[in-house]
């Protein structure tokens, strides 16, 4: 097999030991003579996977019975609509902290359903940083405050959670969930599509605090109510069984690798080798994010010209580093370094950045 360093933004790299286990078990899941894909979601084998994945998420986030975990479909994008359908009641306002394109998408969906308000936005600064407390103004009759923990496209991340007082805090953590220890009790609801940092596309994880769940509207179609999926233990209808199976293996890999503290330590080392090259390049590489808001997951930077950026992407590709082109709305380079990316992969990238600078700077 050719050595590839996968910097794709999502769907993204998965831990090699997980892929190897999936391959081993593909035709014959634990001696059943068939793939897990071919089994009923009501079979005890699948129910065990479903329960194990839920328990592992609770274990990693230190959550007890006051939170419920469900596996859904429709990606984070469906959550943009489900959250207001369930929790944005008439007479209340959904407050948004706008930090990038995904915040905007979440805001637009909520706007279709009820009243919305922007608490603070850094859009005028091309979302280079997170808003500061002094810039934030909350609604008085707030239903919840919505944030995007990591801005996949702009390459910024909340490093200190905004202080929202006792307002319910809801976070889209699609691109940095499980990348660092988390005080999950700060949040009333966390959701994330699996395909960046947790598994394949097609599965979405939602973690909901009971007190929020109890306030959910009962007017929405049943399939769009969190309560339906909680009550059905994620088996209200056919779940994405293969995706949940893979997610469960990724969770096991995280736990066996030392948990969230170990993930964070490695993610910090990885990001540092890449940002160090940016910082000592004398302005050849220009980071999009201000240093205090830099994402450990997605490093975004520009080169002196678009021609050099194209050359950078294609030379990197010829050396096995793929997925480095920036998002079409921002341009430049984006290196996505999710949990499964090795320190070695980031070092190979940093060495290439040094060489490219010497040859073209
Ligand atoms: C990728 C991404 C989304 C969109 O996820 P889908 O699963 O495609 O709906 C939403 N939010 C963030 C932060 C993302 O990175």
Image: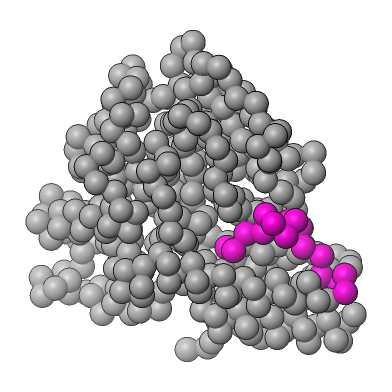
Residue drawn at point x = 70 percent, y = 71 percent: 275
Q: Quadrant of the C terminus?
A: bottom right
Q: Nearer the viewer, residue 44 or 38?
A: 44
Image position, residue 300 (x, y; %): 71, 62
The outermost residue toward the top is: 91
Image position, residue 44 (x, y; %): 9, 56
- Up the image or down, 218 lies above or below 230; here it is above
Q: Is residue 328 left or right of residue 139?
A: right
Residue drawn at point x = 51 percent, y = 79 percent: 342
- Up the image or down, 79 lies above or below 57; here it is above
Q: Is residue 264 left or right of residue 219?
A: right
Can residue 13 be seen here? The reply is: no
Is residue 284 a member of the stretch shown in magenta? Answer: yes
Q: Nearer the viewer, residue 241 or 38?
A: 241
Residue range corresponding to the magenta coloring: 282-297
| Quadrant housing residue 259 | bottom left
Image position, residue 353 (x, y; %): 75, 80
Q: How many marks?
A: 0
Q: Is residue 34 left or right of residue 335?
A: left
Type of colouring: one colour
| Quadrant housing residue 162 | top right
| Quadrant housing residue 276 | bottom right
Query: Which SS type dominates the magenta stretch?
Result: loop
Residue drawn at point x = 77 percent, y = 72 percent: 278
Can residue 166 be seen here? The reply is: yes
Q: Nearer the viewer, residue 90 or 200?
A: 90
Residue drawn at point x = 34 percent, y = 54 percent: 61
Q: Is residue 176 left or right of residue 211?
A: right
Is residue 291 a member of the stretch shown in magenta? Answer: yes
Image position, residue 229 (x, y; %): 26, 37
């Amino acid at each position: 097999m050719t050595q590839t360093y996968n910097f794709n933004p999502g769907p993204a790299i998965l831990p090699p030991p997980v892929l190897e286990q999936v391959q081993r078990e593909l035709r014959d899941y634990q001696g059943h003579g068939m793939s897990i894909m071919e089994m009923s979601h009501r079979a005890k084998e699948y129910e065990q996977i479903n329960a194990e994945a839920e328990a592992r998420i609770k274990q990693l986030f230190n959550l007890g019975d006051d939170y419920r975990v469900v596996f859904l479909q429709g990606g984070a994008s469906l959550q943009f609509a489900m959250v207001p359908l369930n929790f944005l009641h008439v007479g209340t306002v959904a407050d948004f902290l706008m930090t990038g394109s995904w915040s905007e998408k979440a805001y637009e969906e909520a706007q279709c359903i009820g009243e919305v308000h922007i608490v603070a936005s850094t859009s005028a600064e091309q979302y280079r940083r997170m808003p500061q407390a002094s810039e934030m103004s909350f609604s008085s009759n707030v239903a919840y405050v919505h944030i995007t923990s990591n801005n996949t496209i702009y390459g910024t991340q909340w490093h200190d959670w905004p202080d929202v007082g006792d307002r319910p805090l809801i976070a889209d953590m699609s691109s940095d969930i499980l990348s660092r220890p988390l005080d999950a009790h700060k949040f009333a609801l966390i959701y994330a599509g699996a395909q960046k940092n947790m598994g394949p596309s097609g599965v979405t994880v939602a973690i909901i605090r009971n007190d929020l769940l109890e306030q959910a509207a009962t007017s929405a179609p049943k399939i769009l109510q969190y309560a339906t999926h909680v009550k059905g233990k994620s088996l209200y209808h056919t779940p994405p069984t293969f995706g949940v199976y893979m997610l469960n293996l990724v969770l096991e890999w995280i736990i066996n690798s030392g948990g969230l503290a170990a993930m964070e330590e490695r993610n910090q080392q990885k990001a540092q080798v890449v940002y160090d090259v940016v910082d000592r390049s004398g302005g050849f590489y220009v980071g999009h994010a201000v240093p205090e808001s830099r994402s450990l997951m997605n490093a975004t930077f520009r080169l002196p010209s678009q021609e050099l950026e194209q050359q950078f992407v294609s030379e990197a590709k010829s050396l096995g580093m793929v997925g480095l082109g920036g998002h079409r709305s921002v341009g430049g380079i984006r290196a996505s370094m999710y949990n499964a990316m090795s320190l070695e992969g980031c070092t190979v990238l940093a060495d290439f950045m040094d060489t490219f600078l010497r040859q073209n700077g």
